[in-house]
Image: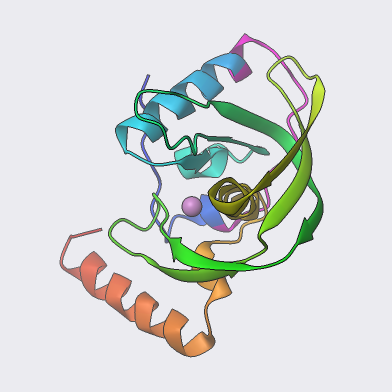
């Protein structure tokens, strides 16, 4: 089932999400719904707060090959370490039509639980490292415009306010 994607301005996006404690069918359904919503958007990552659920999980698929899925669900993720840096264009499904360059580490080592509650490690680079860090931020109430200078952030906020007024948000 598709879920509604919350846009910037919705208080759920500014909240620190709660740990997942129940690895039950409800969680499995939420993860399935999040994948469906992310693929339909389309996007490469989606965090639970973006569908109004203040819980620590996100889904992602940064596969580059056509027709090949690389579904990854990270539940209660922890960033173990990061290294290097990369600059690249970033967007967010909660900020439709807004893209800009964000500085992120090049490599990320993280651990997380799967839908059954089993812990696993992930060591990745490039787009998937960027994605993990972006989505993990959402679980801490941080959105990607936080990574901009105050000046650029205010510019984007003004643009969004105009779009809200125009009913285009
Ligand atoms: Ni996002």
Residue 104, picture quadrant? bottom right
Q: Is residue 22 magenta?
A: yes
Per the image, is 65 magenta? Answer: no
**Is 129 on the left or on the right of 5, as rendered?**
right
Residue at the (49%, 41%) spot, across then down: 45
**2 lies above or below 52:** above
> What residue occupies the far bottom of the structure in this picture?
151
* Left/right of residue 40 with respect to residue 120 in the rendered view: left
- The x, y position of residue 50, in whole percent, is 48, 44
- x then y, percent, for residue 9: 42, 61
Give the residue at x 51% y 56%. 11
Which corner quadrant holds the N terminus? top left
Image height of 74 relative to 9, above or below: above
In the image, residue 18 above or below residue 144: above
Q: Is residue 3 visible?
A: no
- Answer with the quarter of the image where residue 58 lies: top right
Res. 134 in view: yes
Magenta stretch secondary structure, dominant: loop
Near-viewer residue (56 or 99): 99
The residue sitting at 57% across, 73% down in the picture is 147
The colour scheme applied to this rendered structure is: rainbow
State which region is magenta: 14-27
């Amino acid at each position: 089932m598709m879920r509604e994607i919350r846009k910037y301005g919705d208080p759920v996006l500014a909240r620190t999400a709660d740990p997942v404690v129940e690895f039950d069918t409800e969680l499995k359904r939420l993860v399935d719904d999040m994948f469906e919503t992310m693929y339909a958007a389309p996007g490469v990552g989606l965090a639970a707060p973006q569908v109004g659920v203040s819980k620590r999980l996100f889904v992602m698929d940064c596969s580059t090959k056509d027709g090949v899925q690389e579904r990854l669900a990270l539940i209660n993720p922890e960033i173990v370490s990061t290294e290097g840096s990369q600059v690249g264009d970033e967007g967010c499904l909660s900020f439709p039509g807004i893209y800009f360059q964000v500085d992120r580490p090049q490599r990320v080592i993280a651990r997380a639980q799967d839908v059954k509650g089993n812990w696993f490690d992930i060591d990745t680079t490039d787009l998937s490292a960027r994605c993990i860090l972006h989505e993990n931020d959402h679980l801490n109430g941080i959105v990607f415009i936080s990574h901009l200078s105050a000046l650029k952030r205010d510019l984007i906020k003004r643009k969004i306010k105009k779009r809200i007024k125009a009913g285009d948000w």
